[in-house]
Amino acid sequence: MTDLFDLMAEKSGSKEDAKYGASGDMKKTQYVLELIGSPADPDTLKCIITSAEQGMEMNCYSTVTDAVSNQDECISEISPLSITPCLKEADFYTCGADAITAFTDARGLGYALTPRNAALAAMQNYWVDIAVTNVAPHVKLITDEVFEKRYRDPSYKSDTQAVNAACKDLEIFFDALDQQLEGNKYIVCDKYTWADLHWTAYVHLCVIAGCNSLIDERKNVKEWLNRIKTRKSQCGQDEVAYEMLPDAGETQQGMLKSVAISNY
Amino acid sequence: MGLFSKSKPKVSASPKLKCMLGDTASYKCLFLASYRKIPIEIEWDEPSVLDDKMSESLHMSNLNRFPCIEDGDFTVCGESAVMTYLNIKGREPTVHPRKARVLAMQQYWIQVLKTKFMPQVDSGDQGATALEALDKALIGQKYITGEFSLADIHWAAALKVLEDSSKTSIFSKYKNITDWLAKMKTEIPDFDVKNQKVAA
């Protein structure tokens, strides 16, 4: 089997950097995680945020800029049902945001993100469900128009009407989020949970795709996003997970940044 | 409270689970409550948007999430939220793999069900690709991930609904899957529940 991770690491130029422990410095994380995904894919962003929150280093390879010639075939070897993004840790492979985020959360150095209180945990997953079921389809339409179609054809002009309509359709959910955040530091309570992590991925894509009004016109959402942009990671290390996400320019180019933990 | 002081008697009316016959999400919640021996009152009904009080209060009308659970003054709707609630409540151990790799496998198979198998079946397809993969994964395994997990609950509920709607032929040719399902029927106490008021 061709190891797509090795091929993409070589293409991205991080193969030499990834020789873990070569310098003699031992990090708390046993292995460096490797991720294959797309910068315009919210599921990929969720994996990156989880990794940064839990203090796990992650080399990220983009299916756009680090693409190899037989990429689809190689992905189907790792993920026979074509579920992406894909993760590798030593001899272990898994695919899909749910599997990768759960794995990283369990392997990481920080506290688990799910609240112990049953009602709060249920509320958390209610908001995750809203994000994944109701918000995601509209965000996908936006990212397809603004990013994905341009990856395939750089001369593609995005359909502004379709993007604006999708932004409009999202308003009801952002209004609800704004209402929920009234008096709350984070979505469910005063602690950061999976609900915040999922919404961060979708909100970030809306911002860099130009749908800023969804955030700017809602005071509580705007304040929440400012908190997300500056909060230190869950694992207690001096990292801000949001800064690991690709910005608008990087996303336009199809680039992903790796998660590097500097103060281990 | 002091060491020898009387503990406060717990007044605990059973939570009420509002389910819909033929709905996979309802059976997932029911199976989890049953497996974890959580006493619940089951109400079989047509779902109403008014049940989803949280979405209504947030002005997200017509989301119509179900099933719903009502426990005292707490109400939440939607498979994910209700299952999370039922997996924490009660005294039985939570269904949650401790090993990160098993946890990842659990989540992977739940995603396969939700994003690959169910959409194919709903569009009239046989979902063969996902079933072939599941059948292969079950070779030499008692459970989908090797140990009992939420993946078993999710898939058992989906296949039960297919069975109840006379669509067993979709999966009956996969021996490992049918053997595993037969095992699930003995391990999930209320697998054949239809109208009982109280599970467990």
Image (cartoon, coloured by chain):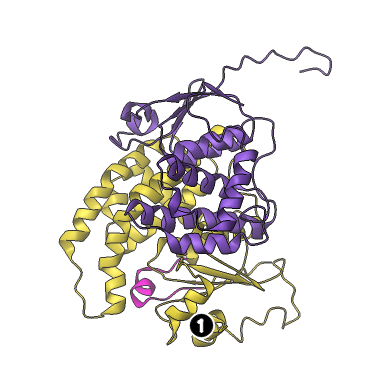
Chain colours: A yellow, B purple
Say which chain tag 1 marks: A
**Image quadrant where one finds the C terminus of chain B:** top right
Q: Which one is in front, A175 or A123?
A: A123
Disc 1 is placed on an element classified as helix
Write the residue at 60% across / 45% down.
B182
Q: In the rendered view, tell whether residue A124 sits above or below residue B90.
A: below
- Looking at the rendering, which quadrant does residue A248 occupy? bottom left
Q: Which residue is mark 1?
A: A8
Observer-nearest residue: B199 or B150? B199
Is B120 contained in the magenta span?
A: no
Q: Residues within 10 Å of mark 1 (few under 14, many from 20)?
A: many
Q: Is residue B24 above or below residue A98?
A: above
Q: Residue at x 37, y 48 (%)?
A: A133
With B134 as the anchor, is B101 left or right in this view?
Answer: right
Asked if residue A50 shows in the view, the reply is: yes
Q: Residue at x 65, y 54 (%)?
A: A110
A256 magenta-colored: yes
Locate the N terminus of chain B by quadrant.
top right
Where is residue B152? Give x, y as percent.
58, 48
- Rendering coords of residue A235 (x, y %): 64, 56
- The stretch in magenta equals A245-257
